[in-house]
Image (cartoon, grey):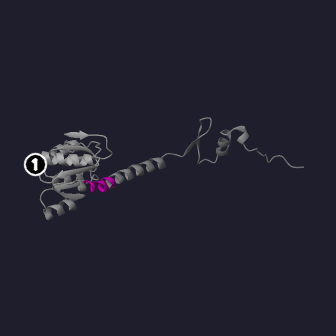
Amino acid sequence: MAIVADSQYHVLAVDDSLMDRKLIERLLKTSSYQVTTVDSVSKALEFLGLLDGQQHEIDVNLIITDYCMPGMTGYDLLKKIKESSSLKDIPVVIMSSENVPSRINRCLEEGADEFFLKPVRLSDMKKLRPHILKGKSKEQQQQEEQQQQQQQQQPLLNTCSNGTLLNTCSNGNKRKATDEGLSPERRRPRFSTSHSLL
């Protein structure tokens, strides 16, 4: 398993062919992606935390996988990812050296974001960014929704200059608390209505 750091987006590349894996790794690095490579679907599932049945917090922004591999295929990996509640939004790209329309359609219908024919080229790497950004925006939307819910659940509180918490919904002493926080020269003079003018 090879890991390269210092990049904004992390791609998991799965291919049983060492030569193809090295090519994909080099193309992804050239395109400024952080890359993790594995040589089988089972190792990819292990890395993603799906093999042991316990899902881990993995920061992968895209998975690119070969279709034909011994044991489980790239299509099997695609199905496992799309069945996972925590990983289903990660974009998946399938690659194959065989141009079989039924295979391509089946992968796209199952949720693959793209299907590349091998050999993969640098121009193909440029097609990855929109899928990564789409996956990122879903993740960011979920985080923003969670933050908004948390903010709505918290009571609205203000802090006075003396450190006392004051509920802004109460009609009580909001003005008084504001006035106490001001310096004497910034305070407005108070007029009493109890004095009568003669």
How many numbered marks are there?
1
Please provide percent x and percent y for residue 52: 19, 41
The structure residue drawn at horizontal position 13% and vertical position 46%, both measured from the top left corner, is: 19
Corner quadrant of residue 59: top left
The amino acid pointed to by label 1 is Gly
Corner quadrant of residue 186: top right
User: Which residue sits furthest top?
Assistant: 162
Please provide percent x and percent y for residue 120: 19, 54
Magenta segment's dominant SS is helix
Q: What residue does disc 1 label?
A: 71
- Residue 15 visible, this orientation: no
Please provide percent x and percent y for residue 137: 36, 53
Judge left or right: residue 16 versus residue 31.
left
Q: Is residue 16 magenta?
A: no
Under circle 1, the secondary element is loop
Judge left or right: residue 13 versus residue 142.
left
Q: Is residue 128 magenta?
A: yes
Using the image, determine if residue 109 lies above or below residue 89: below
Q: Which residues are magenta?
A: 125-133
Judge left or right: residue 179 versus residue 14.
right
The structure residue drawn at horizontal position 61% and vertical position 47%, both measured from the top left corner, is: 170
Please provide percent x and percent y for residue 85: 28, 51
- Residue 130 visible, this orientation: yes
Residue situated in front as seen by the camera: 129 or 26: 26
Residue situated in front as seen by the camera: 101 or 17: 17
Residue situated in front as seen by the camera: 18 or 160: 18
Q: Residues within 10 Å of mark 1 (few under 14, many from 20)?
A: few
Please state, as top left, top right, bottom left or bottom right, where the N terminus lies in the image: top left
Judge left or right: residue 152 versus residue 15.
right
The structure residue drawn at horizontal position 29% and vertical position 55%, both measured from the top left corner, is: 131
The structure residue drawn at horizontal position 12% and vertical position 50%, both measured from the top left corner, is: 72
